[in-house]
Image (cartoon, rainbow, N blue to C red):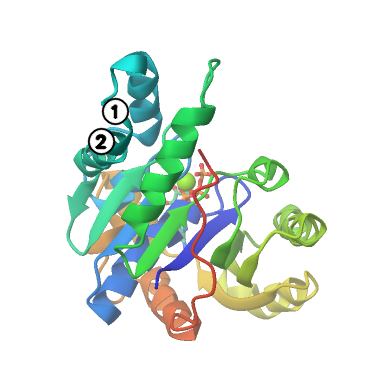
Amino acid sequence: MTISIAVTGKGGVGKTTIAALLVKTIHDKTGEIVLAVDADPNSNLHEALGVKAGKSIGDIREELLKLGEQIPPEQGKADYLEGLIEGATVEGEGFDLISMGRPEGPGCYCYVNHLLRKVLDKVSERYKFVVIDAEAGLEHFSRRTTRDVDILIVVSDPTARGFMTAKRVKELVSELNTKFGKMYMVVNRVPQSFADKVAEEAAKVGIECIALIPEDELVAEFDLAGKPLTSLPPDSKAYQAIQKIVEKLPLKEAEQTLWWQKI
Ligand SMILES: Nc1ncnc2c1ncn2[C@@H]1O[C@H](COP(=O)(O)OP(=O)(O)OP(=O)(O)O)[C@@H](O)[C@H]1O
Ligand SMILES: [Mg+2]
């Protein structure tokens, strides 16, 4: 059974940083190859993971659409597509990465999307853990493009606006009856000097806050140098905080596996 974890939150709060460190930590703790999914159209998860970007699912969709009638007959189509997705999967140390790419442009995608979803479902079933770096903003919730995820991690920065966004995510999720096994909040870039005050404010959001991740100079330094976050040393405070998060996550209690609603 696959356990899917989606990381969401306001722009720039640290979703990609957290997703990359989750991928590394889950692999290190379980030995499993993790499927990392970059669901942000402005993809940069590959950089945080230290690999080159491959072809995106968006690119594959466009190719399929261009091929039209030339796609091999019915039975062969799924296999053909699986081959394309495999070709677009980037292999890293302890993970495979798929980038979703840009959302669809004009044109009739229904059939292609249906086919892609089916094949992506099949591909994701091969993995025990899927970590999704979701796009910023709430549109994907209102379009119901993010749903049926086992664990949703809502990231906030220690600001009133960040907490407000987290609250809106919670409200939207309950209004839309979006299915998440569990929802947690993580506050990132917390200055040590007022961590207590941040914890107090975070508690008012109404989502269980499982971690305050400290402001970590090493993260800034690695990002400045363009070094992958997966090579952060063990004394990185952010990395240590992610390890504690993984210990707390219910990684043995998968409920839903469908999440390919993005495309
Ligand atoms: N704990 C931390 N300590 C210091 N810097 C951090 C920390 N977490 C993230 N950053 C920095 O914050 C910036 C934004 O992080 P990141 O790209 O992970 O955010 P994001 O939510 O994915 O952004 P976007 O919405 O643009 O995709 C980066 O420059 C990163 O180096
Ligand atoms: Mg990002």
Task: Give the vertical position of 42 relative to 89 (above or below).
Answer: above
Task: Give the vertical position of 143 relative to 211 (above or below).
Answer: above
Numbered label tally: 2
Instruction: Find residue 182 and report its image quarter.
Output: bottom right
- What residue is shown at x 22% (from left), y 46% (from top)? 90
Residue 226 % position (x, y):
27, 44
Given the image, on which type of amino acid does mark 2 rest?
A: Gly
- Does residue 103 show up? no
Residue 187 is tagged as none
* Residue topped by disc 1: 73
Disc 2 under 8 Å from ligand 2? The reply is no
Q: Is there a contact, CB below 8 Å, between mark 2 and mark 1? A: yes
Quarter of the image for the N terminus: give it: bottom left
Task: Give the vertical position of 262 relative to 252 (above or below).
Answer: above
Disc 1 under 8 Å from ligand 2? The reply is no
- Does residue 160 show up? yes
The one of 156 and 112 positioned closer to us in this rendering: 112
Direction from residue 56 to residue 132 in the image, left or right:
right
- What residue is shown at x 38% (from left), y 77% (from top)? 240
Q: Secondary structure at mark 2?
A: helix
Residue 192 % position (x, y):
56, 75
Task: Give the vertical position of 141 relative to 191 (above or below).
Answer: above
Q: Secondary structure at mark 1?
A: loop
What whole-number distance in Å separates the C-alpha atoms at marks 2 and 1? 6 Å
Direction from residue 190 to residue 21 in the image, left or right:
left
The one of 93 and 75 positioned closer to us in this rendering: 75
Mark 1 burial class by Cα count in 10 Å: few <14, some 14-19, many 20+ = few
* Residue topped by disc 2: 76
Given the image, on which type of amino acid does mark 1 rest?
A: Pro
